[in-house]
Amino acid sequence: MDLALALVEDDLGRGIARAVAREMVMFLRRPGGQSQFSVALWSKEPATDPVRAAVSAIHADPGARHGIAELAQNARLSPRHLQRRFTAELGMPPASYVERVRVEAAQRALAEGHDPVEAIARRCGFGTAETLRRTFHRHLGIAPSDYRARFRSTTSAAEPQQEQEHS
């Protein structure tokens, strides 16, 4: 599917490839070194390099400090200017974007891994399991532990049991 989307992008352009990916509920492009982190389909594409740099920094490490000062330094703009450009280009302020990317990172970690919720909360930038729980409720209407129970892949759920059998 990734190859097909790349061919669509080459032949028809990025906009059409994004539309196809959105219709198929897929990522347009997944970087090889990261577990399905990419520019999310729910957001607009950054139009300028400074905003693109800020978005790339957020996706590279969702759990890092992504306050406006850090993002502005990465984008080489003043915090106020980045705030305005980011919101104009992506339709939401940087803090909202960071929170959505962190929620998605936590969703993947819960569905694919076995780490405790507290560890996932820290790694994804929420600090505590309680902050993750509140954010999950606000965005998804469900607790992280309930999300894990519903969406954990069958291979992820079987791995701890196999490890115990071999111990």
Image (tube, rainbow, N blue to C red):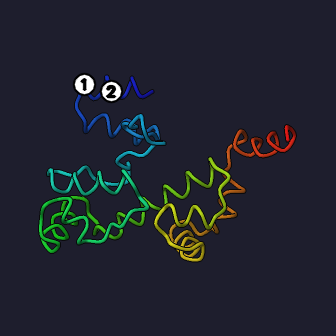
**Mark 1 and mark 2 residues within 8 Å of each other at the beta carbon:** yes
**As shown in the figure, which amino acid type bears the numbered disc 1?**
Asp
Q: Quadrant of residue 87?
A: bottom left
Image position of 113 with respect to 162: above or below: below
Q: Residue at x 65, y 56 (%)?
A: 115
**What whole-number distance in Å separates the C-alpha atoms at marks 1 and 2?**
6 Å
Q: Position of residue 102 (x, y in %)?
A: 45, 61
Mark 1: secondary structure? helix
Mark 2: secondary structure? helix
Quadrant including the N terminus? top left
**As shown in the figure, which amino acid type bears the numbered disc 2?**
Ala
Image position of 110 with respect to 135: above or below: above
Q: Position of residue 152 (x, y in %)?
A: 68, 49
Q: Residue at x 59, y 77 (%)?
A: 130
Image position of 116 with respect to 83: above or below: above
Quadrant including the C terminus? top right
In this rendering, position of residue 41 left or right of residue 129 = left
Q: Nearer the viewer, residue 123 or 1?
A: 123
Residue bearing the label numbered 1: 10
Q: Residue at x 55, y 70 (%)?
A: 132
Residue bearing the label numbered 2: 6
Tell me the number on the disc at residue 76: none
